[in-house]
Amino acid sequence: MKTKSILTYFSSLLLASLLSCSDMLEEKVFTFVSGEDLIANKNYKELVTGAYNSLSYPWQWGNYHMIVNFDCDYQTGPTWAFGSTGAGNFYEDGSNTNFYYYYYITIRRASYHYYLVSQMDIPEKEKSNAMGELAFLKAWSYFNLVQFYGEIPLYITSISEGAPLNLPRSPIKDVYEHIIECLTFAEEAMYSTKDAEYTKGHPSKGAAKALLAKVYCTIGSASMSQGNKITVSGGPAIRTGDNGEDVRIPFPAKISLSKDQVAGYEGFNSSEYYQLALNKAKELIDMNEYQLYDSQEELWSPSSKNGKEFIFSLQTVPQNDDLGNYFATDYCGYYKENGELTSGYYILRDHWLQMFDETDERITWGVMHRIPFATNSSTGDLRWCYYPARDSVKVRLGIDGYQTTDELRYDAHLYGSKLLKFRQVTGPVDGTRSDFNFPYIRYAEVLLLYAEADNEVNGGPSARAISEVEKLNRRNKSRLASAIGTATPWTQESFRSYILEERAKEFGQEGIRRFDLLRWGIYLQTMNAIGRTDENGVIKEREQRHLLLPLPANEVNTNQYIDTNNPGW
């Protein structure tokens, strides 16, 4: 693959050596070092860290969060903030281009560094773990790329080992076979979190098992045949009132959809992969290496970073990079010296919040309900707005933390859910640089993957599937799955829809919703059910071409094996 980004990481030289693995993202560049020298010096930790380091690039320069969060049904905000990505204009968008290239940098580093470590004379257990971590990173990168771009060039070995600079696109099935091969190796090679040698914050055997379960569920849902039913909460965002003006529709409708089989997944057997997913998720649960935190507040406390629920996260360090600053302030906002909250432009729509039970901690604790948005020019007092509108009676009575002077504002960045999970930083969220570990895989997802797979394998949920989901129900203080099933007995379709909705609620703005809509083959139906735009004017209408992101123009123009871009681009 010939790109400027890849070529700057020279084909036969290692550019950088890095600090210890506990400071993964701090990079020190010094003199050029050959692979042979690194092998001789046994610098395997630096090689592992160098591969991890490239995961930060899409955040600092490529705006990873725009690709994984903006293009879904529940994300909204000001139209100017969403730009081309939020409107579905992905072609030659900087975020899309960098998402593609930076994951290939990770793949390149992981492959070459794997080769170098394999040649080192170091203790076998340390070598095995290092190679396992690199295999995991390669699998993670390909998993992100294949879901968003479909067929992609597949580098089994790196260019530095003699692989051709350009390769044709490989079938989706071949890419997944390599992902599974890497993860199968990684789950045996890496340390367990219980091993004395394990370094906190790094992937472990459990991370490989969790990602395998996710890969298997992705294949199982994407390859499931056309016409299977699934229900989503959504529909139109606005209607025309009697006076001809637009009126918000605050409550989502239940929309039954017929899924499409995702193109490129026809050669997979859905039932077989769901059985694999069920087995793998069960293995991880039974290992008892990870647990849920007891509350949302404890889960998202700074003291819980890399704790018992976080299986794989982007690692950042306090006061040393832009990742935490940009993400925490753009999604949650920060306080100015006068007490006003500024920034926080990206919010979740009212349709998302209205799905929750009123007692659910994910909205009672997890959502900001009062915001100091301005200052009274006459008195100097802060002006506060409240959210959601349904709490107007509480405001009038001045109860549950509200004041009678609180205002209802429908500004695009104020009327919606700002999530407190993004204040998981050790420094102040005040617009200065601070740390935030973005969660790629949490244990909560493993429980939901288990329940999803169990439901598809058994034609409806087993008692254990319901029991695993209820671990989350109890933590979140939401209605128990067994109680819902008692009132209206679960069917395969209703439980499938329930799990999809639980994933939307549990992982709000964690980069999962778009993946889910695509893998279930309901992306176009769900997005277009909203109407052309949402209540803030953000374009949600999508076409067939949006099912895949476009390859960067340079990839098509310089790779002699690629003649056309993805359909419609």
Image (spheres, rainbow, N blue to C red):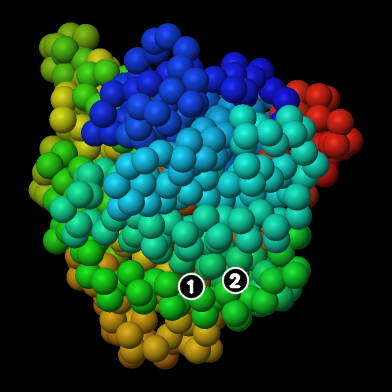
Q: Amino acid at mark 2?
A: Gly
Q: Amino acid at mark 1?
A: Ala
Q: Nearer the viewer, residue 458 or 414?
A: 458
Q: Would residue 198 appear left or right of 73 to someone viewing this image?
A: left
Q: Are marks 1 and 2 in contact (CB under 8 Å)?
A: yes
* Image coords of residue 340 (percent x, y): 22, 20
Considering every residue shown, the one lying at the far right of the view is 563
Dot label at residue 277: 1
Element type where label 2 sits in the image: helix
Q: Is residue 369 visible?
A: no
Quadrant position of the N terminus in the picture: top right
| Residue in view at x 29 percent, y 47 percent | 123
Q: N-terminal of the two: label 1 or label 2?
A: 2
Element type where label 1 sits in the image: helix
Can you identify the residue that label 2 sits on?
220
Q: Whole-Å distance between the Cαs marked 1 and 2? A: 8 Å
* Image coords of residue 359 (percent x, y): 21, 63
